[in-house]
Each structure stands twice: as structure tokens, then as C-alpha cells.
Amino acid sequence: MEPTIVSGTEVSNKVKDDIAREVEQIKTQGGKVPHLAAVLVGDDGASRTYVNAKVKACERVGFGSTLVKLDADISEAELLSEVERLNNDPDIDGYIVQLPLPKHIDEQKVTEAIAPEKDVDGFHPVSLGKMLLHLPGFLPATPAGILEMIKHYNIPTEGKHCVVMGRSHIVGSPMSVLMMRNDYPGNCTVTVVHSRTQNLKEITRQADILIVAIGKPEFVTADMVKEGAAVIDVGIHRIDDPSKKSGFRLLGDVKFDEVAPKCAYISPVPGGVGPMTIASLLKNTLLAVSLNQ
Ligand code: NAP
């Protein structure tokens, strides 16, 4: 079977083009141009890459963007006062604090200090509560991006069995809620599996839709997947590869080459969920402008 490749690159480009058109319209009408800020603490290579990609995406759609770089040894109190400053800056519509933070800083405390109306990452308890209640608000960027991909490719979800692998606060848990909601995409019967799950393979093999967010390179093999399934791979791993100019290549949580022939739909890494996360962040920033007006 030739699977349909669920291309996050393609869908995210479409989302960005739509946003760029909206920004043009806002500018013509003299409205508030959306402005996203990103806070980067320390100099972790992967975090820097993600943040730079977010800033570049802002430029592409015509948003204002601000990058706040802070030293790795900044105290928690200093970071919290920076968060407070961004909360009170009327020009910033939304902002993110790039995770992970250095070990001496309590991530949950920082996440909760972000004003809920500027929480474009969708990690604040208020955002997650609204998601659970199906109220308008910011959806966590990665799960929201996955919904957008499913919608774009018209992947059927109603009545399907969706197995979500992983229960993190930023991907697995919200994803399971969204796939269960009475909506499209949604209306699935959802099973969540995690590191304590027994008989994992028996469960994943029942999935019509398998969403994998466990952070283990190429963990999901062909024998774990049902014929004709839709597989969405959230994992992202940099593997050293001296043959590449960059010195590394990217792998997902799914062994793509052997799983793909069994699937009706599959998302690749790179070019799958990654670009969608950024597109969702931009969508949330646009939403922030309208919600806050
Ligand atoms: P995480 O916080 O490390 O959570 C991993 C989850 O997987 C946990 O719930 C863990 O179970 C579960 N798990 C670990 N090993 C397992 C196993 N052998 N079988 C079943 N479940 C297992 O990870 P995350 O933040 O959700 O991220 C997951 C992956 O997605 C990572 O590779 C990350 O880099 C990537 N990611 C990509 C994007 C993107 O934009 N593409 C965004 C976010 C994350 P326990 O709860 O029991 O520990």
C-alpha cells in the first residue's frame, strides 16, 4: 500500500500563507499587528534552533517578533520579573518561554506566571482547563498542529480507535482530550499508553489512528501497527551523522521505512509535526490579538 504522506511542511505553509493574508488585511485597516515574543534562557542548541525558527516564521507572516535572550544562570526571581514585564507590555500579544529551563528554575511556576491571555503555547492551567471544557482559548501548539494536519488530509476520526502513546502535559495528555472531544477531528475512542502500560503492542495494533509522542527514536516498528492505520509521529531526535553537512540527521519515534508501507497515512520526520507546531503558535498569536481586543 502507498501511504498518503501527511506533510506538515505543506500544511504549515498553507496556514502561514493564510495568516500572512490576514496580517496584510489588518495592516491595510490600520489594526494591531500581532507581536510574538520568545524568551530563551541559556544556550541549548536545540532550543536555540526552535526559537530562531519561531522568530523567522513571525517575519514570514508579517508579525512583529522579539527575542529575549537570558543567561543560563539567571535566577528564578529575575526570570519571573521578565515574565511580569512581558505580561504588562501592551505591544506583546503573546509570548512563549522556551522549555526546558535550567534545573534551578521551577518550570511550572514560570508557566503559571504567564498571563493566560498571552499564553500562546497553551501550557497554562487556564488554557488547559478551557480546552477540556471545549471553550475558546489557546490549544497547546503541537496537538493543535496535529488536528490541523488531520483536518487538511480529511483523515476520518469519528468512531475510530485512537491510541496516543505518551502522556506528557504538552503533547500526549492534551492530544488524548482533543481526539475525544465531540468535534472533528475528534469523536474517537481514545486509549492512552505510557511507560507502565502492559501488552503495549496488543493495544497499539488496535489503533486506527496512532499518535506517537514518547521520545524514543524509532521505537514503533511495523509489528506494532495495524494495516491501514494513520500514524502521526511527534518524536524528534538529533542523531549524529558525520555524512551530513549539519553533522546530524533527524529521526522520529516511528521506524518510518518499515511502518509506512502498512499505513493509509503517515507523517514523516522531519517535515511532519515539527513545522505544524510553529504554525499553531502563529495561529494562537493571531487569536490572542482578537481575544484581547
Ligand atoms: P516526555 O515528556 O518525555 O513524555 C514521554 C511520554 O512517553 C511519557 O508519558 C512516558 O511515560 C511515555 N513513554 C516513554 N517511554 C515509553 C515506552 N517505552 N512505552 C510507552 N510510553 C512510553 O516527551 P514529550 O515532551 O511528550 O515529547 C515526546 C517526543 O516528541 C520527544 O521526542 C520530543 O522531542 C518530541 N516533541 C516534538 C514536538 C514537535 O514540535 N515536533 C513538540 C514537542 C515534543 P511516563 O509518563 O510513564 O514516563
Image (cartoon, rainbow, N blue to C red):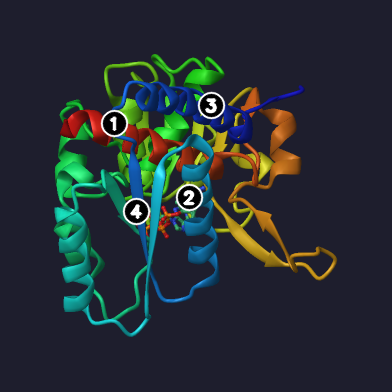
Residue position for label 3: 17
Does the residue at mark 4 contact the one at mark 3 (Cβ under 8 Å)? Answer: no
Q: Which mark is residue 37?
A: 4
Can you tell which quarter of the image residue 205 is in?
Answer: top right
Q: What is the spatial separation of the Cα atoms under label 4 and label 3, in whole angstroms?
A: 20 Å
Q: Earlier in the sequence, mark 3 or mark 2?
A: 3
Q: Residues within 10 Å of mark 3 (few under 14, many from 20)?
A: some
- Tally of marks: 4
Q: What is the spatial separation of the Cα atoms under label 3 and label 2, in whole angstroms?
A: 15 Å
Q: Earlier in the sequence, mark 4 or mark 3?
A: 3
- Residue type at mark 1 is Leu
Q: Residues within 10 Å of mark 4 (few under 14, many from 20)?
A: many
| Residue at image location 57% in from the left, 33% down from the top | 231
Q: What is the spatial separation of the Cα atoms under label 1 and label 2, in whole angstroms?
A: 17 Å
Q: Residues within 10 Å of mark 2 (few under 14, many from 20)?
A: many
Q: What is the spatial separation of the Cα atoms under label 3 and label 1, in whole angstroms?
A: 16 Å
Q: Is residue 57 left or right of residue 265?
A: left
Q: What is the spatial separation of the Cα atoms under label 1 and label 4, in whole angstroms?
A: 15 Å
Does the residue at mark 1 contact the one at mark 2 (Cβ under 8 Å)? Answer: no
Residue position for label 1: 287
| Residue at image location 33% in from the left, 21% down from the top | 29
Queried on whether the Cβ of the residue with tag 4 lies below 8 angstroms from ligand 1, the answer reads: no
SS class, disc 4: strand
Residue position for label 2: 54
Does the residue at mark 2 contact the one at mark 4 (Cβ under 8 Å)? Answer: no
Q: Earlier in the sequence, mark 1 or mark 4?
A: 4
